[in-house]
Image (tube, rainbow, N blue to C red):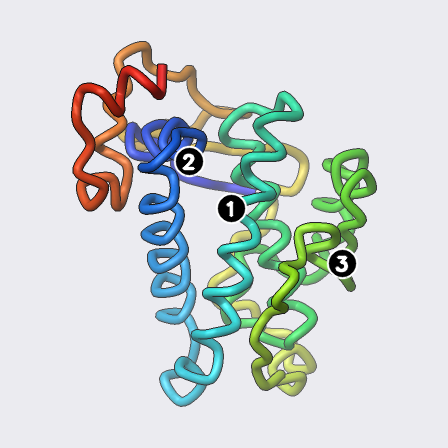
């Protein structure tokens, strides 16, 4: 699928695996993802889906770290979580929130099949072993939207690899190289953690 990748993504990658600041960045990223995807939904459905998305995206942050630990590059680890989300949207009939059309679900799954199988992730069970112990809030489905077959915010034709658009608008297959001088404070939410020199030293 097609994603963006800039210095804030690299900072978030580092922050999510850093003590103290990781929790703040996790919460901020969850809120950002929920807001972004709710903007694609009809206003009448947004509040019905908010708690579900908050819980779901919080669980995918653990998936992201696990994918990094498994050796996936940043772009692919993040793509894994987006694929999980699109499985969930598909299951709920939230066609307008999907990033790729429904007929590409299987192809996206197959690209990460080894990782997904390791953690019990399927199209029908998007979180697998990452499903939180306290559950995920429910939300009403809209199967009629799926029946209509309209994926108005989906971008088709990028199912064979991770396509990454950098800050200059150039597209790279597989992602860009991680900068050497990533400033962890550029991660969303990092400023709320009151990071100081000692915190950064501990992160290194």
Q: Nearer the viewer, mark 3 or mark 2?
A: 2
C-alpha separation, residue under disc 3 versus residue under disc 2: 26 Å
Tell me which numbered mark, 3 or 2, is placed earlier along the sequence.
2
Residue 45 position, x and y percent, is: 45, 85
Circles 3 and 2: CB distance less than 8 Å? no
> Which structural element holds mark 2?
helix
Residue 192 position, x and y percent, is: 20, 46
> Label for residue 132?
none
Q: Nearer the viewer, residue 59 or 162?
A: 59
Look at 56% across and 50% down and name the residue there.
60
Which quarter of the figure has residue 138? bottom right
Q: Residue furthest top?
A: 180
Look at 38% across and 45% down and name the residue there.
23
> Which structural element holds mark 3?
loop
Circles 2 and 1: CB distance less than 8 Å? yes
Q: Nearer the viewer, residue 66 or 113?
A: 66
Tell me which numbered mark, 2 or 1, is placed earlier along the sequence.
2
Classify 93 as above or below 5: below
Q: Nearer the viewer, mark 3 or mark 1?
A: 1
Query: Which residue is tagged 1?
Result: 61
Look at 35% across and 29% down and name the residue there.
166
C-alpha separation, residue under disc 3 versus residue under disc 1: 18 Å
Classify 188 as above or below 95: above
Query: Which residue is tagged 3?
Result: 123
The quarter of the picture where the N terminus appears is top right
Query: Which residue is tagged 2?
Result: 16
- State left or right for residue 87 relative to residue 10: right
Residue 63 position, x and y percent, is: 60, 43
Residue 164 position, x and y percent, is: 46, 32
Q: Nearer the viewer, residue 36 or 32?
A: 32
C-alpha separation, residue under disc 2 versus residue under disc 1: 8 Å
> Which structural element holds mark 1?
helix
């Amino acid at each position: 699928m097609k994603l963006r990748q800039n210095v804030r993504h690299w900072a978030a990658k580092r922050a999510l695996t850093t003590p103290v600041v990781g929790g703040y960045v996790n919460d901020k990223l969850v809120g950002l993802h929920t807001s972004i995807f709710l903007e694609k939904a009809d206003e009448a459905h947004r509040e019905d889906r908010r708690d579900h998305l908050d819980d779901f995206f919080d669980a995918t942050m653990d998936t992201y770290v696990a994918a990094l630990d498994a050796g996936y590059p940043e772009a692919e680890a993040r793509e894994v979580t987006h694929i999980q989300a699109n499985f969930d949207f598909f299951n709920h009939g939230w066609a307008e929130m999907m990033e790729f059309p429904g007929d590409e679900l299987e192809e996206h799954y197959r690209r990460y099949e080894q990782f997904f199988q390791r953690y019990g992730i399927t199209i029908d069970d998007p979180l697998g072993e990452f499903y939180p112990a306290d559950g995920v809030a429910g939300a009403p489905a809209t199967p009629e939207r799926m029946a209509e077959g309209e994926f108005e915010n989906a971008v088709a034709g990028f199912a064979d690899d991770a396509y990454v658009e950098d800050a200059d608008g150039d597209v790279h297959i597989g992602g860009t190289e991680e900068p050497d001088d990533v400033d962890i404070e550029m991660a969303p939410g990092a400023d709320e953690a009151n990071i100081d020199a000692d915190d950064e030293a501990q992160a290194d």
